[in-house]
């Protein structure tokens, strides 16, 4: 998983503290990942020609990664269309812009007459996301905004089958790169709309569909201030877990924690992500690093936090603390205790 850190420097100290608090809370949350089969590495082209995305093959699946073609620059007509569109609607306001983490939902596949439906879907989706820890405990740290994007047709391409094509504002499409559940968007168009909201920290594209799917563009760093874009279906409850996972990367700056037996033990430098480490429990404590304060204490799922030896992660990842949230589809009751 590659994630840029440059976006952190643009945030205010309060927003850094907010993101850090959420990341810290995520390292203390209850569930953990299970063993998964690795996906074959994708060939990486130049950054200008492809985009790295993360996706799930289903609600019970583990994250997979691939490269998809990067969108073309917006035409003059497309820039004007976005400039003339994009009303910003407040959904949840817990404080002034800039004093909270500002979550921006942009709708796709909603016609002019369906914008009320979009606003209702945003409220529903945010309720689903914010019911998951650590969001549930930190609801008051978020503002939520909806940015209207008027599509010519209702729905999204690839729903229900690959031959379905819809004319939408952001170009949402399943079967992206031939992968049915991968829900891609034109990220340049997303930027044109998301930037209408002041100081966005999280951007979520809500596509008008009941089909399960989504994507995480976690390598994107926007001049508007956000790092990463998550996509999700509006009317599929399971897709909310895609949002939770991807925002764990973009806001929480967390690493994946899935176990892959095929890879060897990580031997590189100490990772910057707050939820994984190559250090032993004794080293974490002695150096006062990361989750050292909670080593030996009970975790919310009944386990004990410690440094787990012999963990094998994708690809050759360092280890996370025991009993913490794998910020993907949670698997309650699964405890990582391999030694």
Image (cartoon, rainbow, N blue to C red):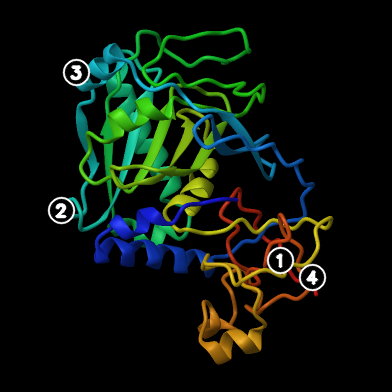
The answer to whether 31 is drawn above or below residue 218 in the figure is below
The answer to whether 118 is drawn above or below residue 271 in the figure is above
Q: Position of residue 259 (x, y in %)?
A: 74, 58
Residue at left 53%, top 78%? 291
* Displayed quadrant of residue 122: top left
Residue linked to disc 1: 335
Q: Which mark is residue 338?
A: 4
Query: From the viewer's perspective, is 192 left or right of 282?
Result: left
Q: Disc 3 to disc 2, how far (Cα)? A: 26 Å
Q: Dots 1 and 2: beta carbons under 8 Å? A: no
User: Of marks 1 and 2, which one's residue comes earlier in the chain?
Assistant: 2
Q: Position of residue 238 (x, y in %)?
A: 56, 37
Element under label 3? helix
Residue linked to disc 3: 84
Q: Disc 1 to disc 4, how far (Cα)? A: 9 Å
Task: Name the mark nearer the viewer: 1 or 2.
Answer: 2
């Amino acid at each position: 998983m590659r994630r840029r850190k440059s976006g952190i420097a643009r945030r205010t100290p309060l927003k850094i503290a907010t993101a850090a608090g959420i990341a810290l809370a995520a390292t203390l949350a209850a569930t953990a990942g299970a063993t998964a089969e690795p996906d074959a590495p994708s060939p990486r082209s130049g950054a200008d020609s492809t985009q790295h995305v993360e996706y799930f093959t289903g609600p019970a699946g583990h994250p997979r990664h691939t490269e998809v073609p990067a969108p073309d620059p917006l035409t003059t007509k497309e820039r004007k269309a976005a400039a003339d569109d994009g009303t910003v609607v407040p959904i949840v306001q817990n404080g002034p812009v800039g004093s909270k983490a500002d979550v921006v939902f942009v709708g796709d596949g909603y016609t002019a007459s369906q914008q009320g439906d979009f606003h209702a879907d945003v409220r529903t989706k945010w309720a689903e996301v914010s019911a998951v820890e650590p969001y549930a405990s930190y609801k008051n740290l978020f503002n939520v905004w909806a940015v209207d994007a008027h599509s010519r047709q209702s729905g999204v391409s690839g729903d229900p089958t690959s031959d379905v094509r819809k004319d939408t504002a952001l170009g949402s499409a399943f079967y992206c790169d031939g992968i049915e559940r991968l829900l891609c968007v034109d990220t340049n168009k997303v930027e044109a709309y998301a930037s209408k909201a002041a100081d966005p920290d999280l951007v979520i594209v809500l596509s008008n569909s009941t089909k399960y799917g989504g994507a995480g563009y976690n390598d994107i760093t926007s001049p508007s201030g956000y790092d990463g874009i998550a996509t999700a279906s509006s009317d599929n409850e399971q897709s909310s877990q895609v949002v939770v996972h991807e925002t764990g990367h973009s806001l929480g700056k967390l690493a994946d924690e899935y176990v892959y037996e095929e890879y060897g033990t990580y031997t590189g430098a100490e990772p910057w992500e707050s939820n994984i480490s190559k250090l032993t429990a004794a080293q974490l404590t002695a150096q006062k690093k990361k989750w050292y304060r909670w080593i030996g204490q009970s975790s919310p799922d009944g386990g004990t936090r410690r440094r787990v030896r012999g963990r094998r992660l994708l690809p050759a990842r360092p280890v996370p603390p025991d009993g913490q949230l794998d910020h993907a589809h949670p698997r309650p009751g699964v405890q990582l205790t391999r030694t």
